[in-house]
Image: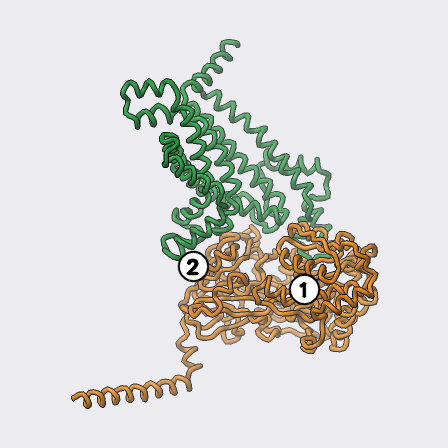
């Protein structure tokens, strides 16, 4: 009897295994089709982040501008940078240039409508650009020389400088808004807006929450949109949670399903936790130290002193101490995200931490023991203290001058106020980064640290144009800045996103800096 | 009484004006460039200068002050925030009730718990109840409220899941923030109540009441506590002011978009109109709370009420 029971049991188990494996084979063969077919479209998600949007106005810059979920669902732009950093169509159907990037002819889709039913034409886009230039609240539009509608759905934009990336930035920063809807509402869209987005903002509390619901009357054929812009969730509510520990608690307690721009100190507890997934993306910004170029400062005319400081900084220690290991050492003062960044730089020597080399460089310098001032904000206290200690180990005295961010902003362009300055700087392209930091013609006092190196300024001017942005010119500028040690990239923080596995994400969709776009994931 | 009330109301006007001028002056001379914060680091020098002119930052101090006082107190135009463009009146209308609710619950807790603790300590002076109450008070005064806030969140929101960890909604969202905020105030109230009660308990009329056979709880509540309330009420007014100003930390931890976070964000962004207007509103609320305190004196102490009434009569006779 027992034998019969065992035989029966084994037979049943064997049959079960066979049928399961058949199912697995079947499902693996058509898994992709079934994922799409079975993808849930009724998902409601809550996303939390330390910064959000303070205003819905399309003309103002928010601290939370770069949050992937908000940058894709509040307003639509003319173009979008997809996962491979390529500009693709969004509201602009196509574009072309016949004069090497000086001007572009842009054609819109002729069926764009906003949530109030207003049809979008080229005149709306022209109005937006002119209004943004007049308000001067979108700094990237400073390169726009003129813009005019050439047809009902076509426009021409001309730039006053063929800087690399200017057109891409223009396309991304030009929001598509109906002039009629904007003027009818009359309040700059600060608390509520009418947009062409696949999502409608149904509730907004500045600096607290923003709720978006998918529209049923979205104008575009979804097959024409890249993966990052697919509206795969029904409702997305964004919560601004400034306190890092609270963001972690919100994730644990289920108040939010996604946490973006997670602080490393809190992210550590989710590493290896089977209930959550932690993804590391690239940051748009790096943490850099820039040396003053003001004539009266010791570091300004002493290359070996600058190099000594660069060699003395222990970046690995800084990444562990300040970022819990969630960071990468840099190989240029620009971040890896910047267009034009060369892969070859990742393997070349870039002031590796070496006390011997630091002391050797210091011996060649004219440093005579004076105290150097390191300027930073209160957010960079840990980094500043590590730099101070590292420099002290090789015999360089540094005094910390840490202040509130607004006060740092007030004096950062005046190189006479400091010897070194810690900053977090990005830049969509290398040209952007160089022009903002090292171009001696950029500001009245010189470059961003009051340096007036016209050799470098000329090199940057040549390499920044569309034709001049070649590997050879890029390397020339990179090598010059590296040799002179005008600026030094210390580390690039990783962009951390954590989400709950209860969401059941089938396909994760990342943007161009490998950050998850919660609304575009397949559930 | 009514004349006294009206007189105090009129006195509020120069007080609010003085607050407005002081805050305006402090913000004017505070380092930091609002134009650069609004336009960002990539703005051109021309754009920055144009923005400074547009915001009126290039005008002399007295011109700007006159314009600000005229707009605010004569035309009642509060303007829009420089950084976000949101009308300041809308922001305050939205946020002030949240801060008031949080401060109100905190006040209720601090006196609802602090005063009884102080009374128990005073009645049982030098016994274990007194020691326990004062140790609790010392812990409350010493413990940073942000640290307590996170501990409470871990216990009640994460482990027990009884209360929400953050955000806004119904009253339950304010319980943890109010408890965190009130710990220090409970301790102060307890200590002040104990001290006031001890002064009163030793009075002759208390001894007389006991000698007459009045039950002890009536001696404490009807006779002693009522007379000990004056300093406690005074403290209530000043603590309410501290609660309004100190709400910023609790609002940040619990992600409550209230006046505290509005003003501190505006200070960091050098958003002068928001800081100035927000400070004026808080000053108005605080002034009203002190006026209420003075009115409560009259309710609690008939001698003070008679004093208010006598002053009015004397002035009328002099006329």
The chain in green: B
Foreground disc of the pair 2, 1: 2
From what the image shows, is residue B216 above or below residue A375?
above
Q: Quadrant of residue B45?
A: bottom right
Q: Is residue A35 visible?
A: yes
Q: Decide if residue B16 is on the left or right side of residue A38.
A: right
Residue B14: image location, x then y, percent? 59, 28
Q: Decide if residue A307 is on the left or right side of residue B318.
A: right
Q: Decide if residue B142 is on the left or right side of residue A136.
A: left
Of the pair B156 and B275, the residue shown nearer to us: B156
Residue B167: image location, x then y, percent? 45, 52
Residue A417: image location, x then y, percent? 76, 52
Which chain does tag 2 point to?
Answer: A
- The shade of chain A is orange
Which chain does tag 1 point to?
Answer: A
Q: Quadrant of residue A17?
A: bottom left
From what the image shows, is residue A463 above or below residue A202?
below
Q: On residue A255, which mark appears? A: 2
From what the image shows, is residue A405 above or below residue A465?
above
Q: Earlier in the sequence, mark 2 or mark 1?
A: 1
Q: On residue A148, which mark appears? A: 1
Coloration mode: by chain
Q: Secondary structure at mark 2?
A: loop
Q: CA distance from mark 2 to mark 1?
A: 47 Å
Residue at 40% in and 54% down = B157
Say which quadrant the N terminus of chain A sits in: bottom left
Q: Is residue A99 visible?
A: no
Residue A12: image location, x then y, percent? 25, 87
């Amino acid at each position: 009897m027992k034998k019969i029971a065992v035989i029966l049991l084994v037979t049943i188990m064997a049959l079960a295994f066979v049928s399961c494996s058949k199912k697995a084979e079947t499902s693996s063969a058509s898994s992709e089709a079934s994922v799409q077919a079975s993808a849930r479209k009724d998902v409601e998600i809550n996303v939390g982040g330390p910064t959000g949007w303070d205003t819905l106005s399309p003309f103002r810059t928010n601290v939370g501008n770069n949050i992937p979920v908000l940058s894709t669902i509040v307003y639509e732009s003319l173009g979008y940078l997809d996962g491979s950093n390529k500009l693709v169509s969004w509201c602009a159907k196509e574009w072309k240039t016949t004069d090497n990037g000086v001007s572009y002819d842009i054609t819109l889709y002729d069926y764009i409508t906003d949530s109030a039913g207003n049809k979008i034409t080229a005149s709306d886009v022209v109005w937006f650009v002119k209004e943004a230039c007049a308000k001067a609240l979108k700094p990237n539009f400073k390169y726009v020389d003129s813009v005019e509608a050439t047809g009902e759905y076509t426009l021409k934009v001309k730039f006053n400088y063929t800087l690399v990336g200017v057109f891409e930035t223009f396309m991304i920063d030009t929001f598509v808004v109906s002039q009629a809807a904007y003027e009818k509402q009359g309040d700059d869209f600060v608390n509520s807006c009418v947009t062409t987005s696949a999502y409608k903002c149904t509730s907004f509390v500045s600096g607290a929450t923003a709720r978006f619901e998918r529209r049923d009357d979205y104008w575009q054929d979804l097959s024409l949109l890249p993966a990052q812009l697919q509206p795969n969730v029904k409702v997305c509510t964004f919560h601004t949670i400034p306190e890092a520990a609270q963001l972690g608690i919100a994730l644990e307690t289920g108040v939010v399903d996604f946490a973006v721009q997670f602080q490393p100190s809190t992210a550590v507890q989710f590493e290896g936790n089977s209930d959550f997934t932690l993804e590391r993306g690239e940051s748009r910004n790096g943490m850099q130290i820039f040396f003053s170029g003001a004539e009266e400062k010791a570091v300004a005319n002493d290359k070996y002193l600058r190099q000594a400081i660069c060699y003395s900084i222990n970046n690995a220690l800084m990444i562990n101490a300040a970022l819990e290991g969630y960071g990468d050492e840099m190989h240029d003062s620009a971040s890896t995200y910047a267009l034009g960044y060369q892969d070859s730089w990742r393997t070349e020597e870039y002031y590796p931490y070496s006390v011997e080399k630091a002391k050797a460089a210091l011996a060649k310098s004219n440093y005579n023991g004076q105290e150097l001032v390191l300027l930073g904000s209160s957010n960079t206290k840990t980094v500043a203290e590590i730099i101070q200690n590292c420099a002290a180990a090789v015999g360089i005295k540094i005094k910390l001058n840490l202040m509130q961010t607004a006060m740092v902003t007030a004096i950062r362009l005046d190189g006479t106020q400091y010897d070194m300055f810690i900053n977090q700087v990005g830049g969509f392209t290398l040209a952007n980064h160089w022009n903002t930091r090292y171009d001696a013609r950029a500001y009245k006092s010189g470059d961003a640290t009051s340096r007036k190196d016209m050799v470098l300024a000329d090199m940057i001017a040549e390499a920044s144009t569309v034709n001049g942005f070649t590997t050879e010119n890029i390397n020339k500028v990179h090598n010059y800045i590296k040799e002179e040690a005008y600026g030094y990239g210390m580390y690039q923080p990783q962009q951390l996103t954590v989400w709950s596995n209860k969401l059941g994400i089938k396909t994760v969709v990342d943007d161009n800096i490998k950050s998850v776009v919660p609304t575009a994931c397949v559930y | 009484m009514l004349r006294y009330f009206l007189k105090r109301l009129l006195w509020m006007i120069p007080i609010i004006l003085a607050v407005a001028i002081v805050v305006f002056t402090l913000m004017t001379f505070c380092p930091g460039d609002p134009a650069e914060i609004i336009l960002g680091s990539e703005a051109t020098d021309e754009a920055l200068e144009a923005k400074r002119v547009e915001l009126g930052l290039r005008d002399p101090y007295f011109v700007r002050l006159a314009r600000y006082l005229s707009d605010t107190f004569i035309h009642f135009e509060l303007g829009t925030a420089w950084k976000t463009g949101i009308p300041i009146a809308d922001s305050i209308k939205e946020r002030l009730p949240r801060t008031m609710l949080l401060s109100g619950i905190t006040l209720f807790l601090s006196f609802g718990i602090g005063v009884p603790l102080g009374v128990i300590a005073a009645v049982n002076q030098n016994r274990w109840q007194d020691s326990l109450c004062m140790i609790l008070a010392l812990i409350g005064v010493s413990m940073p409220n942000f640290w307590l806030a996170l501990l409470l969140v871990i216990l009640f929101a994460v482990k027990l899941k009884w209360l929400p960890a953050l955000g806004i909604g119904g009253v339950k969202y304010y319980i943890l923030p109010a408890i965190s905020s009130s710990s220090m105030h409970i301790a102060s109230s307890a200590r002040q109540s104990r001290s006031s009660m001890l002064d009163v308990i030793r009075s002759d009329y208390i001894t007389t009441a006991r000698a007459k056979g009045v039950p002890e709880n009536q001696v404490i509540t009807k006779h002693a506590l009522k007379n000990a309330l004056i300093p406690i009420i005074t403290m209530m007014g000043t603590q309410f002011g501290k609660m309004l100003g100190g709400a910023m930390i609790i609002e940040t931890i619990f992600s409550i978009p209230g006046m505290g976070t509005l003003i501190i964000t505006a200070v960091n962004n050098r958003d002068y109109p928001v800081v100035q207007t927000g400070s004026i509103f808080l000053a108005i609320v605080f002034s009203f709370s002190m006026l209420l305190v003075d009115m409560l004196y009259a309710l609690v102490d008939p001698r003070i009420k008679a004093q208010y009434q006598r002053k009015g009569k004397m002035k009328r006779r002099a006329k």
